[in-house]
Image (cartoon, rainbow, N blue to C red):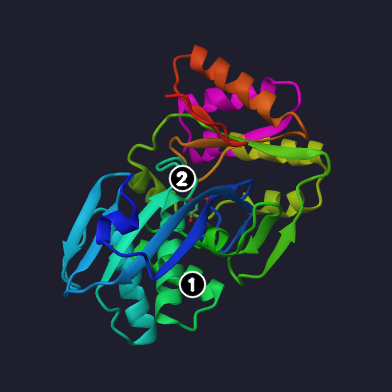
Amino acid sequence: MKTFLQTYGHPPQASAHAPGRVNLIGEHTDYSDGFVLPIALEQAATAMISYSSDNLHHLCAPDTGEQYDLPPDAPLEGLSKYVLGCYRVLEEHFHISVPPLNYWVTSTVPTGSGLSSSAALEVSTLRAVRELLNLDLDDVTLARLAQRAENVWAGVPCGIMDQMASSVAGTRTALFLDTFTLEMRQIPLPAGSEIVVINSGVVHENSDGGYAQRRQEVEESARVLEALNADAGHFGVLMNASHASMRDDFQNSTPGVDALVEILQGLAGVYGARMTGGGFGGCVVALVVSGQALEVGRNAVQQHHALGYEGYQVVPPVRRVE
Ligand code: GLA
């Protein structure tokens, strides 16, 4: 992979990481002022920048091979919607012009899987620019700007959960967030439990259209409040109910995801399992007995593969054998 130095001939002047997230419960509630309970992942995006020596913004993403050389007011496509989108929301917020920059990004957050790869991209980008330009920008405002970049420039009408999770959540405790007030609390996982995340291998199709259609009031928030004080067993029951509601009421699941959820729910050591994220494919999260995550993950992936799917385990991270 071509590094920043190899791409631009000098080291970066600022760099930042930002994680993806998995949402434990509270789905499609964040645009109707409801509650959510995400936790940050080890997988993260890393953005690096330096001042450009010409009048163009240069962008390079070796993971995807994308490369752009753009004047600041260029029409945006692909990666540039996110990156220049971030520059533009900063310009609007601070009444400044972001100088032409060399930009490079890499990410270990799987894309199109409901793990907020785009929020990780936006938050790492904003953090890197904050560092380079020494901007007075707190983490919550940064999350709001990241959401604005996604809404306005990437054209996805998402709520605030993903950007807040990427900006302020940790990997050890879940983040209980009231998306109306942005009040938050760190919530430990129920005693004796840990999480497994498996990518179903089913890529969201038509996710933007379907996502937008489902921007309506949902009752899922009540389950989040109940989960806050639940033991592992009860938390699992709530996760199962959350999935049933997505599958039957909200209809934003798919057969491949439902099959994986059912497999997990039937395995010993699993308290509960549900699809996570925007839906229409992507990842499933399960709460399991402490110490059993690897075994549960391996069994579930094997059984899912036997049905013809090609998913893989994301948490605990395992090296993918291509
Ligand atoms: C996507 C959106 C979030 C949230 C979830 C569903 O991840 O980006 O804002 O609405 O879907 O909970």
At 70% across and 33% down in the image, what residue appears? Answer: 272
Instruction: Give whichever of discs 1 and 2 has the lower sequence position.
Output: 2
Q: How crowded is mark 2: few (under 14 residues within 10 Å), some or many (20 or more)?
A: some
At 61% across and 52% down in the image, what residue appears? Answer: 38
Q: Residue 142 carries which label?
A: 1
Using the rendered image of the protein, determine whether residue 41 is visible from the camera's viewpoint: yes
Q: How far apart are marks 1 and 2 (CA)?
A: 21 Å
Q: Give the range drawn in magenta.
A: 245-273
Mark 2: C-beta under 8 Å from nearest atom of ligand 1: no
Secondary structure under badge 1?
helix
What residue would you read off at disc 2? 108
**Which residue lies most toward the bottom here?**
95
* Front residue (pair 63, 217): 63
Using the rendered image of the protein, determine whether residue 155 is visible from the camera's viewpoint: no
Secondary structure under badge 2?
loop
Amino acid type, label 1 = Leu
Amino acid type, label 2 = Thr
Q: Is residue 198 shown in magenta?
A: no
At 37% across and 66% down in the image, what residue appears? Answer: 12
Left or right relative to 19: residue 2: left
Q: Residues within 10 Å of mark 1 (few under 14, many from 20)?
A: many
